[in-house]
Image (cartoon, rainbow, N blue to C red):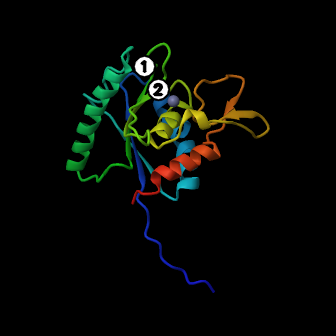
Amino acid sequence: MTPNIEQPQKNAINIVAIVHDDVPEATRKTIYADHFQPLVKELESFTDRKVNVIFGGGAPYSNFAYRGEDTMTILRGWEALGYKFLDEMRKEGFDLSDPLTKVILVTHQNVNIKIAGIALLWPPTNTGTFAIASLNSFLHVGHEIGHLLGANHENWEVQYNGWWAETYMVPERNMIRSISYTFSSANRQNIKNYLADKK
Ligand SMILES: [Zn+2]
């Protein structure tokens, strides 16, 4: 018999989701099932980590002015608020330590006419902590969290499961295809590489 060697549990990935005040009640009711549950299932299937989603709100976070053309200024503003939110949560006893805590503002509208989601990414790994995603497609939350964890556009793919479905990192949707709610194997590997040296 192989001895059962106890492996220390790896830290969870914590997704802090701030729901913007403009998100309608009907969307809020199914927000976890529609936008988060498939992503959690996908991430837990290959990362060997638990994924927690913690919903938050309240001013000045949930009324942040996220719309506009200057996405870098918007992201920097969201970053500053996000750090403040994490500080407040720490004071309340939540240990949401970086780098496995991701803070995403989920919104009703797009950031601007061209952009449905944005993430503040840093070299050399092109990963980060803060993002904004519109809820007008079931794909955007997974796409932006994917960016924060090291997935990229180049490695998206079409998967076929009886119909053609686009993986989370597709840069531009083709609406004839459905959503696979998965990352391509190359992006799964990118995410695993990012997580490899984390506790
Ligand atoms: Zn993207």
Q: Quadrant for residue 164, please give it.
A: top right
- Image quadrant in which the N terminus is located: bottom right
Q: Residue at x 56, y 26 (%)?
A: 137
* Mark carried by residue 117: 2
Q: Quadrant for residue 9, please give it.
A: bottom left
> Label 2 CB, ligand 1: below 8 Å?
yes
Q: Secondary structure at mark 2?
A: strand
Q: Nearer the viewer, residue 63 or 82?
A: 82
Sooner in the amino-acid sequence: mark 2 or mark 1: 1
Q: Residue at x 71, y 28 (%)?
A: 177
- Image quadrant in which the C terminus is located: bottom left
Residue 146 x, y percent position in the rendering: 50, 39
Residue 57 x, y percent position in the rendering: 32, 34
Mark 2 surroundings: few (<14), some (14-19) or many (≥20) residues within 10 A: many
Mark 1 surroundings: few (<14), some (14-19) or many (≥20) residues within 10 A: many
Residue 183 x, y percent position in the rendering: 60, 42
In this rendering, is residue 184 above or below 45? above
Label 2 amino acid?
Gly
* Mark carried by residue 111: 1
Q: Secondary structure at mark 1?
A: loop
Q: Would residue 188 be seen by someone viewing this image from the given angle? A: yes
Residue 185 x, y percent position in the rendering: 64, 47
* Mark carried by residue 37: none
* C-alpha gap between disc 2 and disc 1: 7 Å
Q: Residue at x 22, y 43 (%)?
A: 87
Q: Is residue 51 left or right of residue 74?
A: right
Are discs 2 and 1 less than 8 Å apart at CB? yes
In this rendering, is residue 92 above or below 104? below
Q: Would residue 30 be seen by someone viewing this image from the given angle? A: no
Q: Residue at x 27, y 43 (%)?
A: 86
